[in-house]
Amino acid sequence: MEQIYSTPIELRFSDLDLYGHVNSVAYFSFLETARVKMFENLFRELTGKNIFLLVARAECDYKTAILFGDALVVSISVPRIGTASFDLDYLLHDGTGKNYANARTTMVCFDNVNKSTIAVPQCIRDMQEKPT
């Protein structure tokens, strides 16, 4: 997986369930946090142009439990770019080789002024070619 963005995620006590590990629902919050950070750092200009990147699908394959106190890093890559949508692959890991989960979201590019899907902007297409 050629990552284009990677960020540490701080675990909160509220992420835990009764079993003492991170609840499965919290994983989607981690994906969102990493995705929003990436978009803010790399694609802020799109929001100014009223281009929104909407989640059309989200899936997660859980590998091993995340426990409170574990290090968590989310790394993102772009395996597919279509006409108006693209996929983001996520690796949730500890930064030293322990993988917690693999996930994917399908994102749709949306013009919020005209209320319609649009072609994937070039700055997103460039993500497949330029790791950061």
Image (cartoon, grey):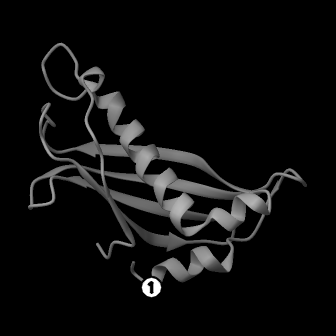
Q: For this view, does 123 lie left or right of residue 75?
A: right
Q: Which residue is mark 1?
A: 130
Residue 91 position by quadrant: bottom left
The residue most toward the bottom is 129
Quadrant in which the C terminus appears: bottom left
Q: What residue sits 39% from the left and 72% below the top? A: 4
Q: What residue sits 15% from the left and 53% below the top? A: 94
- Give the tally of numbered discs: 1
Report helix, strand or loop for mark 1: loop
Q: For this view, does 36 lie left or right of residue 79?
A: right
Quadrant in which the N terminus appears: bottom left
Q: Is residue 119 above or below residue 87?
A: below
Q: Nearer the viewer, residue 33 or 115?
A: 33
Q: What residue sits 53% from the left and 55% below the top? A: 106
Q: For this view, does 81 lie left or right of residue 130?
A: right
Horizontal and vertical percent position of residue 130: 45, 85
Q: Nearer the viewer, residue 37 or 61?
A: 37
Residue 42 position by quadrant: bottom right
Horizontal and vertical percent position of residue 21: 16, 26
Q: Is residue 33 above or below residue 87?
A: above
Indicate the amino acid at tag 1.
Lys
Mark 1 surroundings: few (<14), some (14-19) or many (≥20) residues within 10 A: few
The residue most toward the top is 18
Q: What residue sits 82% from the left and 51% below the top? A: 112
Horizontal and vertical percent position of residue 23: 26, 26
Q: For this view, does 105 lie left or right of residue 90?
A: right
Horizontal and vertical percent position of residue 66: 16, 37
